[in-house]
Image (cartoon, helix red, strand yellow):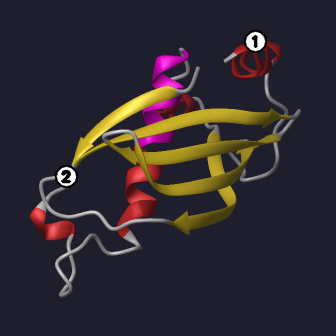
Amino acid sequence: MPHETLIKVRTYECDEYAHVNNAVYLNYLEHARVEFLDHVGFPYRELRQKGYGVVVTNISIDYHRELLAGDEITIATTPLEVGRVSGVFEQRILRQGVLIARATVRWAFLNQHGRPQRLGDELVRILSAV
């Protein structure tokens, strides 16, 4: 079952065409991934305080429909792959159950020096079980 994050589109996120600018989707997706980590018991703030980081190494987004100011959206985040230092999330942006955009997000876990860091067994287990 994917983790769901709810967001209401704000007017300042819209461009001159009155719909959400495509770059804003990256912010929505990042917010939902941080919420996902909090939900599974690994708050991003605590990871950073310990010197670790989760960074995006590649993201691919397919846009299906536009978003407008005031739209209420759900972002469903699901881990697809979990390796020893990296993984893949699928994220879907939905408005009332209708697919707006789908993203595949590849990420890596880094240590305090910005080098790849093996995930702890507990984190691998939790991410694999979701």
Tell me which corner region of the image, top left, top right, bottom left or bottom right, holds residue 124.
Answer: top right
**Observer able to see residue 114:** yes
- Give left or right: position of 68 versus 42: left
- Which quadrant: the C terminus? top right
Residue 75: horizontal and vertical position, in percent?
42, 41
* Residue placed under numbered mark 2 in the picture: 71
SS at mark 2? Answer: loop
Please tell me the numbered disc located at residue 122: 1
SS at mark 1? Answer: helix
Please check the rendered image and state whether residue 35 is part of the magenta-colored stretch, yes or no: yes
**Observer able to see residue 46:** no
Amino acid at the residue labelled 2: Asp
Residue 6: horizontal and vertical position, in percent?
30, 35
Tell me which corner region of the image, top left, top right, bottom left or bottom right, holds residue 125.
Answer: top right
Q: CA distance from mark 1 to mark 2?
A: 37 Å
Q: At x 78% / y 41%, what residue is drawn?
A: 87
Which SS type dominates the magenta stretch?
helix
